[in-house]
Image (cartoon, rainbow, N blue to C red):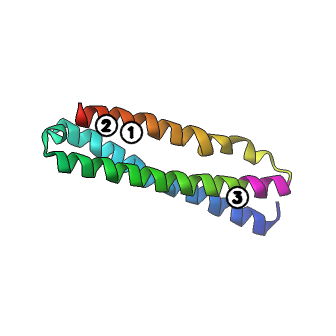
Amino acid sequence: MTPEQTQVWLQHRSTIVVSQIAPTALLITTVALLQFGLADTALAVRVATAGILLASGILGALVQFQSATEAQALAASSESNSRDWLWVVKFITPAVFIVIYFALMVALFL
C-alpha cells in the first residue's frame, strides 16, 4: 500500500471502531438500567428506549458496513490480505447486535 492508501485504510478502521461505541454503550446502559427497574417504567419510556437502541444500531451498522466495503475495495486494489476479516464487521457484528436487541426487547416488554 502507498502511504496515502495506508492513511485511508487507517481512517476506515478508526471509523469502524468509533461507530461501535454508541450502540455498545447504549446496550450496556440498558442492561444496567434493567437492573434498576427499567422494565417496570411506563410503556412510553420502554418504547422510547427501544427506539433509541434501534436507531443507534441501524446507524452504527450502516457506517460499519460502508467503511468495511470501502476498506475492502482499497485492500483489493492494493492486493492486501487485510480485507479478509472485514466480513465480520459487515455481517457478524450487526447480527450480534440484533440478537442482543431482541433479548433486551424481551426483557423490556415481556
Residue 57 lies in the magenta stretch: no
Q: Which kind of residue does numbered mark 2 sit on? A: Met
- Tags 3 and 2 in contact by the CB under 8 Å rule? no
Magenta: main secondary structure equals: helix
Q: Which structural element holds mark 1? A: helix
The foreground one among 100 and 36 is 100
Question: Measured from the top left, where is residue 98 in percent x and y?
Answer: 45, 38
Question: Which tag, 1 or 3, sits closer to the chain's start?
Answer: 3
Q: Residue at x 82, y 52 (%)?
A: 76
Residue 103 drawn above or below residue 17: above
The foreground one among 82 and 58 is 58
43 left or right, relative to 22: left
Would you call the spot at circle 2 few (<14 residues within 10 Å), some (14-19), or many (20 or more)?
some
Cα separation between marks 1 and 3:
27 Å
Cα separation between marks 3 and 2:
33 Å
Give the residue at mark 2.
105
- Tags 2 and 1 in contact by the CB under 8 Å rule? yes
54 left or right, relative to 44: right
Give the residue at mark 3.
70
Which region shows up in magenta? 72-78
- Tags 1 and 3 in contact by the CB under 8 Å rule? no
Give the residue at mark 1.
101
Q: Residue at x 63, y 57 (%)?
A: 67
